[in-house]
């Protein structure tokens, strides 16, 4: 997953304050509440990516309230930028001393949700590159699992690591060790997608997994940034990747689909491809009808509309560059988990407020719904929002426009 680092907004501390979610003590995130809030594997399979440090992190609690989402894929754990075989967030914030991400996790769990952690991503130094072997790589990741009491983990194997055979062997070996030492741990392996499923390096990674006797819950491809545009190209790649899994592991088609995942990019990709809501629905239908194991996307940080909506034809790390309501794409992940996303119904009686536009009760809220009603001889359009004021408290606001007068 590309970080779009040129588009990052704000210092990490400010970003985490935006993500929000209160000043919970770190031990709350790593305590017994993790077991209490463990979710079904289907939720971990549907968890969209969220960067808690960068790209203007959204409030996870607000997303949960608006969509019904329960699981988040936090990204990314890397080796330290200065070198060494110890886990850090984004190469800069040691996991061992972290309290900020732990607070985010604690707040999510307090609302009945949970997290997986993604390791790797596009760019940066990965632990598989920095550690000397599979055992030491696994030991570094075990620190992450233990600290946050994780029930799921994602190995995002991309450039430049997946071009390094030794590093990939370390990562696959570490994944196998973690799977053995943490019974029930949900493990996904994510890699680049191409028109024929995945490229040469992706296929070498699959061969490495086969040689080590390692089978994760799924192997997921990312069919974007590779000449894709729209859902037809993506579903074709998923079909071809299924054939790759069959030929590599000797599975039949159904078994391959049961170990296959999709990891998309919402809106405009890094290379100018477009994946809109209708494309997500088509891929979701494909994934569910073929009984695939995973459906996720990059990223929740981008699951909101830009200003202007097309972001002047640019790709952003903080919005999608397509017309949308906030968290439109998260709702497809919720559907994959088997849940119907909630809807917000505006009231039927508009408040008083002049002939054209009624008073607004908030200037910074999350758009969720609109409606039209007849009242007082006029047709009114309701633009209705919800927004968390404080954890556990929801406030509602609306703006009503008299269509006849305006």
Image (cartoon, grey):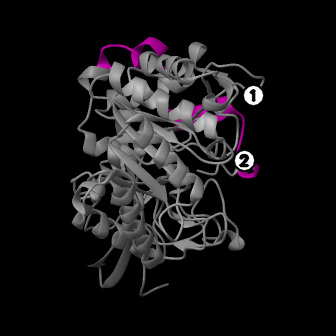
Front residue of 191 and 207: 207
SS assignment at label 1: loop
Q: Position of residue 121 (x, y in %)?
A: 59, 43
Start-end of magenta stretch: 6-33
Q: Residues within 10 Å of mark 1 (few under 14, many from 20)?
A: some
Residue for point 45% across, 64% down: 325
Left or right of 172 on screen, residue 12: right
- Spatial CA distance of label 1 from label 2 is 15 Å
Residue 10 vertical position relative to residue 268 in the rendered view, above or below: above
Residue under circle 2?
A: 5
Left or right of 39 on screen, residue 56: right
Q: Earlier in the sequence, mark 1 or mark 2?
A: 2
- Asked where in the image residue 154 lies, by quadrant, the reply is top left
Q: Nearer the viewer, mark 1 or mark 2?
A: 1
Q: Is residue 294 visible?
A: no
Residue for point 35% across, 51% down: 249
Residue 32 vertical position relative to residue 397 in the rendered view, above or below: above
Q: Position of residue 298 (x, y in %)?
A: 52, 53
Q: Position of residue 42 (x, y in %)?
A: 26, 45
Residue under circle 1?
A: 81
Q: Is residue 45 magenta?
A: no
Q: Are marks 1 and 2 in contact (CB under 8 Å)?
A: no
SS assignment at label 2: helix
Number of labels in the image equals 2
Q: Is residue 26 magenta?
A: yes
Residue for point 40% across, 66% down: 238
Q: Is residue 273 visible?
A: yes
Residue 200 vertical position relative to residue 358 in the rendered view, above or below: above
Q: Position of residue 322 (x, y in %)?
A: 55, 71
Q: Residue furthest bottom?
A: 404
Q: Which mark is residue 178?
A: none
């Amino acid at each position: 997953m590309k970080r779009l680092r040129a588009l990052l907004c704000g210092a990490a501390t400010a970003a985490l304050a935006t993500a929000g979610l209160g000043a919970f003590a770190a031990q709350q995130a790593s305590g017994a509440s993790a077991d209490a809030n463990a979710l079904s594997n289907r939720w971990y399979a549907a968890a969209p990516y969220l960067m808690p440090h960068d790209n203007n992190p959204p409030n996870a609690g607000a997303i949960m309230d608006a969509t019904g989402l329960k699981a988040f894929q936090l990204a990314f754990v890397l080796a330290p930028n200065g070198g060494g075989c110890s886990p850090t967030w984004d190469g800069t914030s040691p996991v061992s001393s972290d309290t900020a991400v732990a607070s985010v996790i604690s707040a999510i769990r307090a609302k009945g949700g949970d997290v997986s952690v993604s390791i790797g991503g596009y760019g940066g130094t990965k632990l598989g590159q920095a550690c000397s072997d599979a055992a030491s790589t696994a030991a570094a990741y075990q620190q992450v699992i233990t600290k946050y009491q994780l029930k799921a983990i994602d190995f995002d194997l991309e450039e430049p690591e997946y071009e390094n055979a030794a590093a990939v062997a370390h990562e696959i070996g570490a994944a196998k060790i973690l799977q053995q030492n943490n019974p029930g741990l949900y493990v996904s392996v994510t890699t680049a997608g191409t028109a024929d499923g995945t490229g040469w390096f992706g296929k070498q990674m699959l061969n490495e997994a086969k040689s080590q006797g390692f089978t994760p819950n799924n192997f997921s491809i990312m069919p974007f940034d590779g000449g894709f545009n729209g859902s037809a190209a993506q579903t074709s790649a998923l079909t071809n990747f299924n054939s790759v899994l069959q030929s590599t592991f000797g599975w039949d088609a159904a078994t391959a689909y049961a170990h296959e995942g999709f990891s998309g990019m919402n809106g405009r990709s890094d290379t100018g491809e477009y994946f809109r809501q209708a494309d997500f629905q088509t891929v979701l239908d494909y994934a569910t009808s073929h009984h695939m194991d995973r459906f996720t996307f990059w990223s929740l940080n981008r699951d909101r509309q830009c200003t202007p909506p097309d972001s002047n034809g640019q790709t952003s790390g903080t919005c999608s560059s397509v017309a949308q309501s906030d968290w439109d794409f998260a709702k497809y992940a919720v559907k994959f988990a088997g849940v119907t996303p909630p809807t917000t119904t505006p009231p039927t009686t508009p408040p008083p407020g002049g002939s054209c536009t009624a008073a607004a009760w908030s200037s910074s809220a999350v758009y969720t719904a609109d409606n039209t009603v007849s009242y007082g001889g006029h047709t009114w359009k309701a633009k209705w929002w919800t927004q968390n004021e404080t954890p556990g408290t929801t406030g509602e606001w609306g703006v009503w426009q008299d269509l006849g007068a305006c």
